[in-house]
Amino acid sequence: MDHFPSVAMIGGGNMANALVSGLLNRHCPKANLHVVEVHEPLRHQWSERGISVSAHADEKLSAHQVWIFAVKPQQMRDVVLQTRRWLKPDTLVISIAAGISIASLATWLNDDGKPWQRLVRCMPNTPALVGAGVTGMAAPAALLQQDRDTASALLSTVGEVVWVADDQAIDAVTALSGSGPAYVFLFIEALIAGATKLGLSPEQSRSLALATLAGATKLAADSTEPIAVLRERVTSKGGTTAAALDLFKDRGLTEMVEQAMQAASIRAAELSQEFGGS
């Protein structure tokens, strides 16, 4: 990104930290950044980094072209209403709050009764903290292409971006990549536990499990062949891998994962109902 817009982070927690770090790594000037954070210890940390910071929303927001809301879903409506007075016609609003629909955000940000259209809803995930995230993104149909490009450029500083059609698709993103790191961590924990029961030390088990996951993921990402083909190449008929995979199949692993993702998607929709009212 050759020219960085001025960005205000509303909420200064972990995801804000990841995004700001990503922007700084791409040589975004610190002078382009501002953080609104109510908690004094976090404000101190931002000040220590040389980033402009305020305890509450104020007129400084009006000087920034992009606002990124990074607050908890239950706080989102109140925070939006507190900041709305400093919106300008060219302000691009990006929300990374889980479960808050585009329609709710557009209504809360309304301009003289008209739903706000310069709006992007995002679902990043925690690997963004190490620059390896993936973010699902959705927006009103009327959003300008230049705003889409700006949002893509900002979120791509912490990983990949994938545009999807609407809130329902964002719920699916939440169930896959938003919650997905926890599924992977659980599987890693299970691999480590299984290896230690087979006689390896906890340290050996951890190293082997992490390297296996990282290597398999890289192989899948770099390959042009279907994932199933890669799996089949590891699986000799009657061999060790086949014995393990047969047990996974018998216990219904694929169906269990599908059901777990359905549960996550349903909960994402419920959060929208709980926190997204007018």
Image: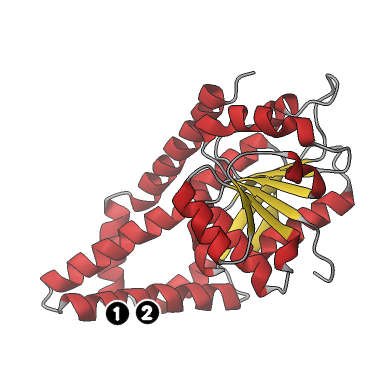
Q: Position of residue 5 (x, y in %)?
A: 81, 58
Tally of numbered discs: 2
Lateral position of residue 204 relative to residue 54, left or right? left
Screen quadrant of the C terminus: top right
Measure the alpha-carbon separation of dots 2 and 1: 5 Å
Using the image, determine if residue 66 lies above or below residue 188: above
Residue 83 lies in quadrant:
top right
Q: Are marks 2 and 1 in contact (CB under 8 Å)?
A: yes
Give the residue at x 53% y 73%: 220
Give the residue at x 53% y 32%: 75
Mark 1 secondary-structure assignment = helix
Label 2: how many Cα within 10 Å (few below 14, some 14–19, many 20+):
few
229 or 135: nearer the eye?
Answer: 135
Lateral position of residue 192 relative to residue 176, left or right? left
Q: Which residue is mark 2?
A: 211
- Tag shown at residue 208: 1
Label 1: how many Cα within 10 Å (few below 14, some 14–19, many 20+):
some
Is residue 99 visible from the viewing direction of this image?
yes
